[in-house]
Amino acid sequence: EANAADLVIISRNNNSGEYDNGTSVSKWTQVTTPILALSPYVIRNNRMKWLQAADNGLTEFSRSDWVIRDPSDPAFAGLGLAVDDVIDSSLGSASLNNGQSAASVGNGTILAVATADNAQLAMARWDADTPFYDGGATPAGPRVFYAAGSGGANPAPGLYNLTTVGEQLFL
């Protein structure tokens, strides 16, 4: 059971449609264990409902550089980062990630955005017991989105693509 785990990781390589059937949203929202989602597809408002947007703003970005928005977050501990610092999170041609519009984070905290346009969400955190967005579901445990693992069919969906810095963030 998910509540018995230390961490639940939702891989980049999955079918997001499995997360919108009937009671699945309610069940996932009730999980008290922290959840780390690597796919922007599963967190849309027509799936797990972490974001206010469904497909609006969901685009692929091949840039692996991220702009840090909240360097005080524990994910960045020990990296010596400041607001607007740029990090390289994933490897060159294997870095075809997907991002969701950062504007749809609601009550979450934007930790990093993609440098491609500074508007695509790369990493965000939502606190337990606070609605994802006004009128949205309230998670029983903390939630983090981290754009990791390649998207699309080329090179392969879910391919491990983290740099040393990306690994530090992930671990």
Image: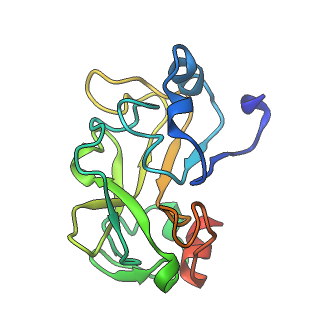
Residue at the location (58% across, 67% down)?
156
Looking at the image, residue 44 sits to the left or right of residue 152; the answer is: left
Closest to the observer, 170 or 82: 170
Looking at the image, residue 71 sits to the left or right of residue 4; the answer is: left
Looking at the image, residue 115 sits to the left or right of residue 98; the answer is: left
Residue at the location (52% across, 77% down)?
94
Q: Quadrant of the N terminus?
A: top right
Residue at the location (30% across, 44% down)?
105
Q: Position of residue 80 (x, y in %)?
A: 46, 82
Single out the residue that lies furthest toward the front: 153
Q: Judge whether 139 appears above or below 12 on screen.
A: above
Display colour scheme: rainbow
Looking at the image, residue 34 sits to the left or right of residue 122; the answer is: right
Closest to the observer, 53 or 137: 53
Q: Position of residue 60 (x, y in %)?
A: 34, 63
Single out the residue that lies furthest toward the top: 22
The tally of labels here is: 0
Q: Judge whether 15 appears above or below 160 on screen.
A: above
The quadrant where residue 8 appears: top right
The quadrant where residue 113 appears: bottom left
Q: Judge whether 56 appears above or below 130 on screen.
A: below
Q: Position of residue 99 (x, y in %)?
A: 35, 58
Residue at the location (66% across, 36% down)?
33
Q: Quadrant of the C terminus?
A: bottom right
Q: Position of residue 45 (x, y in %)?
A: 35, 32
